[in-house]
Each structure stands twice: as C-alpha cells, then as structure tokens.
Image: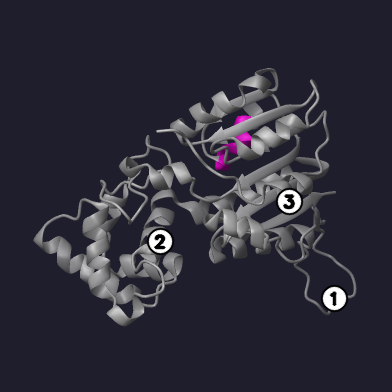
Amino acid sequence: MDFKHVSVLLEETIEGLNINPDGIYVDGTLGGGGHSYEICKRLSEKGRLIGIDQDGDALEAARKRLSEFEDRITLVRSNYCEIETILKDLGVSKVDGIVLDLGVSSYQLDNLDRGFSYKSDAPLDMRMDQRQVITAENIVNEYSENDLFRIIRDYGEDKFAKNIAKHICMARKKKPIETTQELSEIIKGAIPMKFQKNGHPAKKTFQAIRIEVNRELTVLRESIDAMIEHLNPNGRICIITFHSLEDRIVKTKFRQNENPCTCPPDFPVCVCGKKSKGKVITRKPIVPSEEEMEMNTRSKSSKLRIFERV
C-alpha cells in the first residue's frame, strides 16, 4: 500500500518557518515527507534536513519522496521527544527550524492492518511505532473501568465516556475484545441512537485510545521546551495540532517560553531571573482556508501555532 498523506496547512507552515537556505531544519513527524519536501526545495547545498519518524513505513516512503535531496537529508527512526539525543548523535547543537504535524497520516488510517480506523475490521493495534509493546488491545482489555472512563472523557471529550467504559468492561468479561469492529459495536451500544447522527459514535473513543497507546499528549508536553532550547536565534518552531488538548498544550508552552517570569504580578521588577526564550508569532492559531477544508476534509480541525527564538 502506498504511503499517501496530504500535508495540511503546507504553505502556511513553510512561510511560517521563514527558511534560511543554508540552515538546518528538523521535521519531527516526517510522515510521507510533504513538509520536508517543500523545506528541501528551499535549501541550498549547505542546508540540511533531519527527518524523524517512529513509523518504519513512513520513513521508507519519505526516503523515496526525498531521494532527489539525498545529499542534504538525514532520516532517523525515533520519536521527536528524543530530539536532544538525536541532535547530539549527529553533532548538531542548534537548528534553524522545527516542524511538528501531529495528525495521524492518511496511510495509517487507511491501512486496515494498523487498527486506527473504526470504519473497518482489523486487529486492535493503533501503534505508531510497531516496535512498541503496548497496543490498543492491551488498553481495552486490561485498563480498569475508571481508567477507561478517564481517557475517553479526557482524550476523547465524549460525554458518554462513563457508559462506554462500562459497556467495554461488561463485554470483555464474556471474551477479550480483539478487533476494531468488535469495539466499534460495543461503543455504538453504549450511546443512545438519537446522539449517533453527528459523525461516527466510535470516533472519539478511538481517538482517545490512540492518544493513550502512543502517549501523544505526554510526549508533546515534555518535548516543546527542549525543542525551543535547540533553536538558533530567529529560528522558528511550527506545530500543527488536530485536537483541542494538543492545541492547549502548545499555546500554554509557547506563552510560558515567551514570558517565563514567576514573580507575583504586584512585584515592581522581576526577581526570579527567568528570561524570555522568544516570542509567539501566532497570537491566534492559523487555520485552513475554506478551499483546503473542501479539498481535504481531514484538515478541518487543524491549527498551526508558531514560536520564534530570540
């Protein structure tokens, strides 16, 4: 199966990076290489791109797509949370720009074997890195009812989280839940029919389980400070989110790096000694145009935020 993925907010992201042709750039979520390709097109022979992805299929697809730039790219199979180690191993201390596109790729959604989609039957997997041990099946069958309720409520923001968690636990007492179709049917049974008209009833729960499997919010929260630290002066980080919780983390982290002062508001001068790391370029997130949303429905919830290092 070909690795197909339409990069969202592509022009806005490339413009937001303010690319220096001789600079070093990191694509922390390489995917099919859409953003990286546009970055490489703008680099000189001195420029360099470091692409990171934990999905082996994505890396292979990106390697082919970026083959014409092979003299200026380095691809690494890892998670962007390991950026400090990756850069150190490559002998790089600072970079001029970083891109994160936190969306699940179309390939991952459409490849039935990966278990990301509620629209067809497949093993309950949902791992972005298939070297990882924990799968969606482990979470669905081994988490307590309270823990299932918590992740569906917090990560899926589903108002029927409590009932969904209850139905999952009732079903798994009879037999382990092993496939996406089984889970989808259980979720349908937990939500009243009159609330199943707006979108697929399993969508939010599948999203929540995927986030938990891949520790997506934890990884994001724990990585932003380190990435900003590795930017050169005037270097920029562009982060595209698809979920309100992701966007909230990015917004908060960017603001904290712009104004890290912890002094009480009534102090006449700062005494904590914490200095600003840069400035938020996007006071409000950049969202897709109507045209892009029509052409690519998966772009509808995307938001781009940009931060520049001083």
What residue do we see at 61% from left, 62% from top?
A: 247
Q: Residue 81 magenta-drawn?
A: yes
Q: Is residue 167 left or right of residue 113?
A: left
Extreme residue in the top direction? 71
Answer with mark 2 or mark 3, whichever residue precedes in sequence.
3
Q: Residues within 10 Å of mark 1 (few under 14, many from 20)?
A: few
Location of residue 27 in the rendering, given as x and y in whole percent from the top left corner: 64, 38
Tell me, yes or no, if residue 141 can be seen here.
Answer: no
The one nearer the camera, 275 or 309, is 309
Q: Is residue 55 left or right of residue 224?
A: left
Give the residues in magenta: 80-86
Residue at which label 2 appears: 208
Q: Give the main secondary structure, helix, strand or loop, of the magenta stretch.
A: helix
Residue at which label 3 appears: 12
Q: Is residue 261 left or right of residue 290?
A: right
Q: Which mark is residue 11?
A: none
